[in-house]
Each structure stands twice: as structure tokens, then as C-alpha cells.
């Protein structure tokens, strides 16, 4: 009887391993780790210019960003993010025209190369020039700024009511859910932008949700790893910046995997082929 059960499970196990091999071969064909590394580099190059313009345009709002970082998943990168924010605030004092121009250009690099990465993933040959793509990245910068401020404001307002209405444990879970909702909306926006052709919102939902789930699990796993790894003995004084880069790279892998999943769904539904004909 036991032998029959084992024999019955063998085909299922083989089928599962076949699916796993297909997933990794598909991801490798889309160069997911290379694209994630590229986007991580341009994210680091863009984060301070982005915060610079965010502070320059909306600095008087005095939003408490430290409260947003008061989560366990941000423990190891909180100091680096606050350092970037402080650097951006200092740079806004007496900023020259040259600095304004260069920071604005630098802040578009992430979204410019994000769109280029989307062309690689969706195997799309772009017909329009780089100038149009750069302008779209510039527009998205200000869209993201407004979205970021709205999301932070919604989160802080929601956390104020949640902490008053629920016990501490329930409030903490509710805050994570609220943070997840805001993050999902942001991922959905990025998934719609990275696709080189028109993608409907419902066609980007599953990839965005996958990125959110993978990013949440990876962030909690990363915080556990850092807690037990004694990384400061390996990286020394640069440990916080190194951990920030590693965390960003992990999150970018999760994001790219979600985009590739949207691409896979588009290929299966014929949406991608139909878009290429027009």
C-alpha cells in the first residue's frame, strides 16, 4: 500500500520539477537578474536626486517620513534612507541652475532604463526616439512624486485612526496591510509604465500582486538574515550601505519577476502578439 502511494506521487513530483525548471529557464531567458541589477544601480543613482526634487517642491509639508520607516522590514536600511533624505535637504539650500538640471536628469534615469528593460522583457522593438522616452520618464517623476506624497499621507492618516481603534497587535497587522495596499498601487503603476505597449490595468494586476508578495516575503527573510548574519564583521563601516544595496537588489528581482509574469500572461493570451501588429 505504501509502495503504491509512493508510485502515485512520483509523476506529480516529476511534473512539479518540470514546472520549476520551466519557470527558471523562462526567467533566465528574460535576463531577470541582469535587469534587476541594472535597475538597482540606476535606483541608487536616482534616489537622492528624486528626494532632492521632492524636498524642493514639497519640503514645507513637513511629512514625518520616519514614522513610515518604523517597521521591522526597514530596520536595516532605515538609517541609509534617512541619510539620503538629509542629504537631499542640505542640497536644496542655495541650489544652482546646474544642480537643478543635473539632478532632474539623474532622477529620470531609473524610469528611462526601466522602460528599456520592459522592451527587453516583452521583446519589443521601439519605433520612437530616446527623447520621447526621456520625456515620458520626466513626466513619470512628477506623477510618482504626487503618488508618493498621497500614499504617505494616506498611510499616516490611516495609521492615526488604526492605532486609536484597535489593540496594538491588531493595529500592527492592519498597518502592514495598509502599507501593502499602497505598495501594490505603486507596483501597478510601474507595471503599466514598464510595458512598452498599452497594457490594461486588469492585465497588470497579477504581476503586481506577485511582486508585492515576493517582496514582502523577501524583506522579512532579509531582516532575519541580517539579524543572525553579523554582517558588520564582513562589511565593516560600510555595512548599512551594503545592506541597502542588497535589499534593493532583492526587491528589484521581485519586481522584475512580476513584470515577466505579466509578459508570460500576455504571451499566453495573445495580447503581446496583437500589440506588435499595430
Image: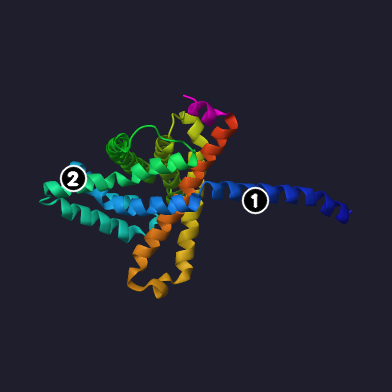
The answer to whether residue 62 shows anywhere in this view is no
State yes or no: discs 1 and 2 in contact (Cβ < 8 Å).
Answer: no
Q: Camera-side residue: 167 or 201?
A: 201
The spot of residue 214 in percent (x, y) is: 51, 49
Considering every residue shown, the one lying at the far top of the view is 278
User: Is the residue 5 above or below the residue 142 in the image?
Assistant: below
Asked whether residue 277 is drawn in magenta, I would say yes
The spot of residue 258 in percent (x, y) is: 50, 43
Instruction: Tell me the element at label 2.
Output: helix
Considering every residue shown, the one lying at the far bottom of the view is 233
Quadrant in the rendering for residue 136 = top left
The answer to whether residue 24 shows anywhere in this view is yes
**Residue under the image location 37 percent in, 45 percent down:** 113
User: Is the residue 274 above or below the residue 95 in the image?
Assistant: above
User: Is the residue 82 above or below the residue 61 in the image?
Assistant: below
Q: Is residue 228 left or right of residue 138?
A: right
Name the disc covering residue 21, or none.
1
Q: How is the image coloured?
A: rainbow
Magenta stretch, residue numbers: 270-278
Q: Which residue is mark 2?
A: 101
Instruction: Tell me the element at label 1.
Output: helix
Q: Is residue 9 left or right of residue 265?
A: right
The spot of residue 165 in percent (x, y) is: 39, 42
Amino acid at each position: 500500500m505504501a509502495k503504491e502511494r509512493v508510485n502515485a506521487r512520483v509523476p506529480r513530483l516529476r511534473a512539479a520539477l518540470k514546472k520549476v525548471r520551466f519557470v527558471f529557464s523562462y526567467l533566465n531567458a528574460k535576463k531577470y537578474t541582469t535587469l534587476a541589477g541594472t535597475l538597482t544601480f540606476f535606483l541608487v543613482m536616482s534616489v537622492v536626486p528624486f528626494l532632492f526634487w521632492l524636498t524642493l517642491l514639497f519640503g514645507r509639508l513637513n511629512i514625518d517620513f520616519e514614522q513610515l520607516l518604523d517597521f521591522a522590514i526597514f530596520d536595516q536600511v532605515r538609517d541609509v534612507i534617512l541619510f539620503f533624505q538629509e542629504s537631499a535637504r542640505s542640497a536644496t539650500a542655495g541650489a544652482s541652475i546646474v544642480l537643478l538640471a543635473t539632478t532632474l536628469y539623474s532622477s529620470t534615469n531609473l524610469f528611462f532604463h526601466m522602460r528599456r528593460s520592459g522592451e527587453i522583457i516583452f521583446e519589443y522593438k521601439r519605433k520612437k526616439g530616446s527623447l520621447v522616452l526621456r520625456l515620458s520618464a520626466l513626466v513619470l517623476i512628477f506623477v510618482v512624486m504626487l503618488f508618493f506624497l498621497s500614499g504617505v499621507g494616506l498611510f499616516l492618516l490611516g495609521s492615526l485612526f488604526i492605532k486609536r481603534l484597535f489593540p496594538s497587535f491588531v493595529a500592527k497587522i492592519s498597518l502592514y496591510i495598509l502599507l501593502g495596499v499602497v505598495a501594490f498601487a505603486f507596483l501597478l503603476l510601474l507595471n503599466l509604465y514598464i510595458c512598452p505597449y498599452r497594457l490594461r490595468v486588469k492585465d497588470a494586476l497579477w504581476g503586481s500582486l506577485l511582486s508585492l508578495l515576493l517582496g514582502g516575503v523577501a524583506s522579512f527573510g532579509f531582516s532575519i538574515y541580517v539579524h543572525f548574519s553579523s554582517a558588520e564583521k564582513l562589511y565593516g563601516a560600510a555595512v548599512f550601505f551594503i545592506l541597502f544595496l542588497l535589499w534593493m537588489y532583492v526587491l528589484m528581482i521581485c519586481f522584475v519577476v512580476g513584470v515577466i509574469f505579466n509578459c508570460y500572461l500576455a504571451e499566453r493570451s495573445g495580447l503581446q502578439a496583437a500589440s506588435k501588429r499595430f
